[in-house]
Amino acid sequence: MADVVCDTSFLMHLATTRVRNIDSLGDEIGEVSFVVPRIVLGELDRILRRGDARSDDARRTIEFARGLRTVRMDAGAATADDAILSHAAARGGIVATMDRGLKRRLRERGCSIMSFSNDRIVLEP
């Protein structure tokens, strides 16, 4: 089973959108386990406390994340993206994100990327 490290954008989409291939993901991609960096939970908490339009999505995402394994990553990183990038570059694995900038940085380092396309989870080439 492969660990898939989720960033904030992917996790929020996963928690708030009906994913069409979630039940067949193991057959399509292989068995995966979504993991949530604690720094991502911190980002979600900040979004929730802002009280803006994304707060309800952040609350639903935090509740959803309670059912997933959390991991500690580089505490010295300035952002969640930096922590995830450092983790992926050092350990390999798959990073789940919808963030174009993070995707570019991950590709530059040869990391695997999972994302969404038409509300389906896909591994990007």
Image: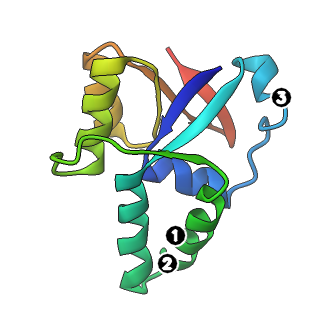
Q: How far apart are marks 3 and 2 (CA)?
A: 30 Å
Q: Do the residues labelled 1 and 3 touch (CB within 8 Å)?
A: no
- Looking at the rendered structure, the kind of residue marked 3 is Ser
**As shown in the figure, which amino acid type bears the numbered disc 1?**
Ala
What is the secondary structure assignment of the residue under circle 3? Answer: loop
| Near-viewer residue (105 or 89) | 89
- Residue type indicated by callout 2: Ser
Occupied quadrant, residue 106: top left
Residue 66 to residue 103: above or below: below
* Residue drawn where x is 56% and y is 65% of the image: 62
Q: Which residue lies furthest to the right in this view?
A: 23
Spot occupied by residue 45 in the image (x, y as percentages of width and height): 41, 71
Q: Can the viewer see residue 104?
A: no
In depth, the one of 10 and 44 nearer the eye is 44
Which residue is under mark 2? Answer: 55
For label 3, the residue is 24
Residue positioned 62% across, 27% down in the render: 122
Q: Are there few (<14), some (14-19), or many (20+) residues within 10 Å of tag 2? A: some
Compute the Cα span from label 1 to label 3: 26 Å
Which residue is labeled 1 in the image?
58
Sequence-earlier tag: 1 or 3: 3
Residue ID at (83%, 28%) = 24
Q: Is mark 1 on a helix, strand or loop?
A: helix
Contact between labelled residues 1 and 2, with CB atoms less than 8 Å apart: yes
Residue 77: x and y in percent read 18, 46
